[in-house]
Image (cartoon, rainbow, N blue to C red):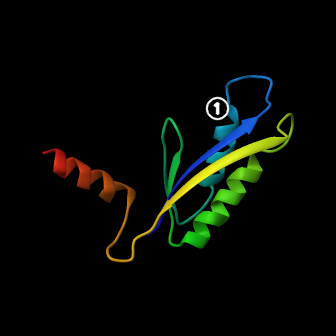
Amino acid sequence: MPLMEISVVPLGTKNPSVSQYVAEAVALLKKTEGIKYTLTAMGTLVEADSVERLLEIAARMHRTVFGGDVQRVVTSIKIDERTDKPLSMNGKIESVKQKLG
């Protein structure tokens, strides 16, 4: 399964805190069936069955933040996909933990 790290940041808001906007984008994930996600301090990790699905989710999260005083949104994504073996969020973490001992 491909993985995506996504960060959605509104610009030009009246308050420097963006957590309310991040919460709106993450709420969309809660309603999306067939995916796994993990919220982190600097972005959200999403696991889905295809890159196309990840890109569709990224577009929806990006659009969700617009409205009210938000007229500009910067969204950064990284996608990790392997074809030689299964890939998962937990598998990547476990691989590093094994190497740490």
Residue 30 seen in the figure: no
17 vs 75, nearest the viewer: 75
Q: Residues within 10 Å of mark 1 (few under 14, many from 20)?
A: few
Q: Quadrant of residue 101?
A: top left
Residue that mark 1 sits on: 19
Residue lying at 81% horizontally and 45% vertically, measured from the top left: 66
Residue lying at 71% horizontally and 57% vertically, measured from the top left: 60
Identify the residue at the far left of this view: 101
Residue type at mark 1: give it: Ser
Q: Is residue 95 left or right of residue 81?
A: left
Check disc 1 and report its element: helix, strand or loop.
Answer: helix
Q: Is residue 7 left or right of residue 86?
A: right
Identify the residue at the far top of this view: 15
Residue 19 seen in the figure: yes
Measuring from the top left, give residue 100's x and y in whole percent: 17, 44
In the picture, which quadrant includes the N terminus?
bottom left
Q: Is residue 6 left or right of residue 99?
A: right
Measuring from the top left, give residue 31's x and y in whole percent: 63, 56
Q: Is residue 9 left or right of residue 34?
A: right
**Is residue 93 placed above or below 3 in the rendered structure?**
above
**Is residue 49 placed above or below 71 in the rendered structure?**
below
Measuring from the top left, give residue 56's x and y in whole percent: 66, 65
Q: How many numbered tags mark residues here?
A: 1
Identify the residue at the far bottom of this view: 83
Residue lying at 82% horizontally and 37% vertically, measured from the top left: 70
Residue lying at 39% horizontally and 56% vertically, measured from the top left: 89
Q: Quadrant of residue 91?
A: bottom left
